[in-house]
Image (cartoon, rainbow, N blue to C red):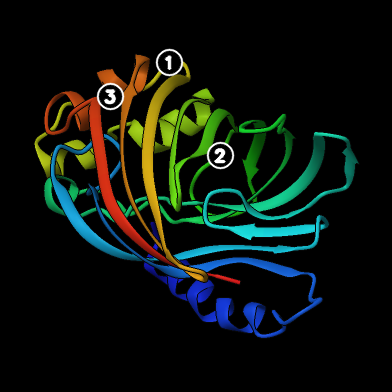
Amino acid sequence: MSRSFIYSLAALAPMLAAPAMAQSPWSGTLGAAVMVTPDYLGSDDYTSRVLPDLNVKYGELFYLNLRDGLGWNLYQQQDWSLSPFIGYHLGRDNTGDLSGFEKIDAGLTGGVRLSYQPGAWNYSLKAETPLGGDVEGYKVTLRAGWRSEIAPNWYAGFGPSLIYSSKEWTQDMFDVSARDAARSGLSRYRADQGYWRLGLTGSMTYRFASDWSVTGLAGITQLSGDAKDSPIVSQVGDATQTLTGVVLSYHF
């Protein structure tokens, strides 16, 4: 994830949390995570990162988190909600195997999210398109998740995800231009269609104090189609990727 975006959200978090007192509409978690993730989407090299844990809500009206961005619950009916949102696409800082490639600038996205939460399960479907940066096209994300208390102060969760990136989005992230090929030694490549990414994550949380918790998490994703066939993945990367991490969170 782009460091400048992470730092800006981390700086914003204390300001959002400041009004969180009795009877305040503000709620959520703030904290920090230590993650081991791939260098880039499709990489077989891994690096450690320290990231903010940010999940803030203003009543049932607005939300802000790193996964779903800044959203407004425009429509709510029982367990359903519909929200337009401003998100973020990561682009790619090209280092290591891709140090000869031109950088792909990150940028904001705009989209809409439909969610349904009948108890311990939650489901969401969102579509977004870039508003800036070097990526074009659109991306559609379908997620399901389950979370429940399995023992006093212990919570378990897991969930699958399925992401489709359009042809244009795939080309911007996985094409190898003549210039990139000449500078990196990889084969030239042009994606002909979009691709699917399948993921599965799991977590275990221990609430060790009334306002504090620690969470261990792990996940795996699988690239397919024209993303998997790109030399960025097939020659110097891996279509199967994992992530692990520990998150310390303050609840307010």
Q: Label 1, on which residue?
A: 192
Task: Work out whether 141 lies above or below 212.
Answer: above
Please name the amino acid that badge 1 sits on. Answer: Asp
Q: Which residue corresponds to the image point at 28% horizontal and 24% vertical from the top-left?
A: 189
User: Label 3 vs label 1: CA separation?
Assistant: 10 Å
Q: Quadrant of residue 219?
A: top left
Q: Residue 242 at x, y = what percent?
A: 24, 36
Task: Work out whether 87 lies above or below 6.
Answer: above
Badge 2 marks a residue whose secondary structure is loop
**Would residue 138 appear left or right of 2 to someone viewing this image?**
right
Relative depth, front residue between 113 and 19: 19
Q: Which residue corresponds to the image point at 61% horizontal and 33% vertical from the top-left?
A: 120
Relative depth, front residue between 235 and 23: 23
Relative depth, front residue between 68 and 229: 68
Q: Residue 221 at x, y = what percent?
A: 33, 29
**Would residue 111 appear left or right of 102 to someone viewing this image?**
right
Q: Residue 60 at x, y = what percent?
A: 81, 55
Relative depth, front residue between 10 and 87: 10
Badge 1 marks a residue whose secondary structure is loop
Q: Residue 211 at x, y = what percent?
A: 51, 71
Please name the amino acid that badge 3 sits on. Answer: Tyr
User: Label 2 vs label 1: CA separation?
Assistant: 15 Å
Q: Which residue corresponds to the image point at 23% horizontal and 26% vertical from the top-left?
A: 240
What number of labels is visible? Answer: 3
Please name the amino acid that badge 2 sits on. Answer: Glu
Q: Label 3, on which residue?
A: 189
Q: Label 2, on which residue?
A: 136
Disc nearer the start of the sequence (2/3) = 2
Residue neighbourhood size for the residue with mark 1, other residues' Cα within 10 Å, grouped as few (<14), some (14–19), many (≥20): few
